[in-house]
Structure formats: C-alpha cells, structure tokens
Image (cartoon, grey):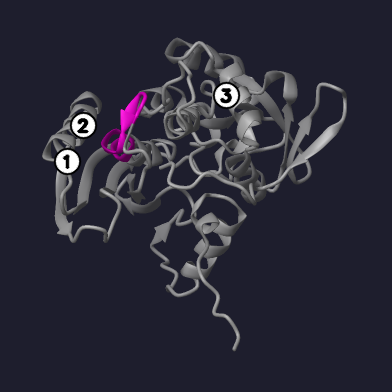
Amino acid sequence: MQNKKTIELESGAGGEKSNNLISQIRKNFAVSRKWKNMQDDGASYAIGQEQLVFTTDAFIVDPIFFPGGDIGKIAMCGTINDLSVMGARPIGIGLSLVIEEGFPEEDLQKILTSIGKVSAESGVPIVTGDTKVTERGKIDKIEITTSGVGLAKKIIGNGGAKAGDVVIASGNLGEHAVALLAKRFNYQTKIKSDCQTLTREIQSVAKYLTACKDPTRGGMAAVLNEIAEKSKVKIMLDENTLPFAKETVALSELLGIDKLSFPSEGRFVATVSPKYAKKTLQILQKFNAQAKVIGSVEPGKGVHLQTSLGGIKKIDVPRGKLIPRIC
C-alpha cells in the first residue's frame, strides 16, 4: 500500500517547501482582476486616488513569552509591518484568539496588555475580532490571527528592484530568532527580539524605495531571493557588511542553522536608487544606527554573496533545517 503524502513541518517555515505549499493552495482559487499585488505581503484594491491594502497572518509562537516581546506583540507588529512594507498607513486591525482550555488568565492578560500597548503606540486600533476556546490538548496554549487594512498613495511592491540600485537593511537582522531560540535552549544572550512596528521608518523613506520587504520566515535569504526573482535581477551581497551581531553569528554556528535564514520581526530590507541611497540611509540611521548598505542590484538573476576571501557564493531559498513556530 502506497503511503499518502503529508504536510511536513518544514512546509510552514518560510523556505522552498513553504513556497511549494503556498503555490499548491493558490491553485484552488480564482484570480481576481480587481485585487492586485496578491503575491506580496498584502493585496491592494484601488479606491479613488488611494490603494486599500489588506493582509492577514496567523501566529503560533513557541515560547509565547520571550525576551523583547510575546505572541501578542508579534501578532500586532507583524501585521502592521506587512502593511507598512507595501507603503500603506495601517488604519485598523482584526484580532482573532483561539485559546486552549486551562490557559492561565494571568498570561492571557499579559498578552492582551501587549496588544493594547502596540495598538496605542502605533495609533492602529483593534476594530473587530473573534474569540474561541477549545478543549485541552487541541492546540498548544494560544493561537492568534490578525488581519489588517491600510491606505497607500503608492504601492511599494517587492518586484521593483532595478540594476544599479543599492540594498539597504534597516538594522541588524535575525535577532527575533536569537531571542526565541535562546529561550528554547536556555542559551544565555543579551539580545532581545527586534519585534517592533516599522510604519514611521518606512513612511519617512517610502518615496525613495524601489522594493521593500520584512525578513520574517525564511529570513534575509528568502526575502532577497523573492525580490530578485520578481524583479528579474541579481542581488550581490558583501560578506563584510552582512547585518548580523556577533551573538547572532555565534548562535547560528552553534545550532548549525544559516544566519541568513534567521527571521526578524522589526526590520526590513529595501532596494533604493543610487541617487537617493545616501539620503535614505541618513534618515534610517536616525531610527537605528545599525542601518547600512549591504549589497547592490545587478543584471542577472539570483542572490549571491561576495565572500571575504574573494569568492562568489550563491544564496538559495532556505531549505532543510529551518526554525518552526518562530512567528
């Protein structure tokens, strides 16, 4: 008897198998002619002189409390950021909670407090939602789904990079992964999750960006490969300017997981015309002094790394050992 194919954990981790699963899902749905950008972080719909941007995301984080945040904070920041990287100003969030029977009310209140704090600080209200409680053992503690809407005068797609552009990271990457993995494995580190909202940063430079995306599941490797593929260009990175703290590199080597696949929840990578690169960097460094140019866009395809020894290494979409339940 032939074994039936099953969904693997890797299929939800943001790498090659995630892309394959998403493609399989998409095949079942009709294509809309009115909705655009449906393969970006959100879909857009023209309303008058602006574009409405809509996005949704589910969060199954382990552990639910970690240095620098919790599942509530990441749910809010993640959805707000998916709107922001497309150039939208977030205007409302829908919040859905599925809670396991026996979940401590004290922990729920901590999560709700985090959600409320992000909402108040960002000015993005919770406007609708749903709550369910399921039997003990049916889920692991709590799952959160958030949907968001925003308005944009101009959409920033992730397929607009052009040869000659520079690649900028808004700060050191991968620190959300470090915070969660350190908590899981009782690894001592001073690094906290980079989880935060990006709206003000991106709005301050939006007019200069040709492509933009936040490196969540699959990290920088997945995001830059997506930008390169959709833009039909080659992205060349410089190993000497990779945006990772020493502790991030150390944990990557200890666990045998490529740091380029480490996710962030409060950073973005973008391509910028060389004409505006210096100005963009100066503005971003007011928000985060670690913002830097990390590479360039060239004719060709794929993502490549100029190593410190002078060689060229191809950076593929992550596959194999990835990090489950990170966001």
Left or right: residue 233 versus residue 157 is right
Please provide percent x and percent y for residue 24.
Answer: 52, 69
Left or right: residue 104 versus residue 69 is left
Above or below — where is 24 with respect to 124?
below
Q: CA distance from mark 1 to mark 3?
A: 34 Å
Q: Nearer the viewer, mark 1 or mark 3?
A: 3
Residue carrying label 3: 248
Q: Is residue 140 magenta?
A: no
Q: Secondary structure at mark 2?
A: helix
In the image, 106 versus 197, the foreground residue is: 106
Residue carrying label 2: 119
Disc on the earlier residue, 2 or 1: 2
Please provide percent x and percent y for residue 57.
Answer: 35, 50
- The answer to whether the residues at label 1 and label 3 have Cβ atoms under 8 Å apart is no
- The answer to whether the residues at label 2 and label 1 have Cβ atoms under 8 Å apart is yes
In the image, 254 versus 78, the foreground residue is: 254
Image quarter of residue 210: top right
Q: Secondary structure at mark 1?
A: strand
Q: Residue at x 52, y 21 (%)?
A: 171
The residue range painted magenta reads 66-76
Three-letter code for the amino acid on which mark 1 is drawn: Ile
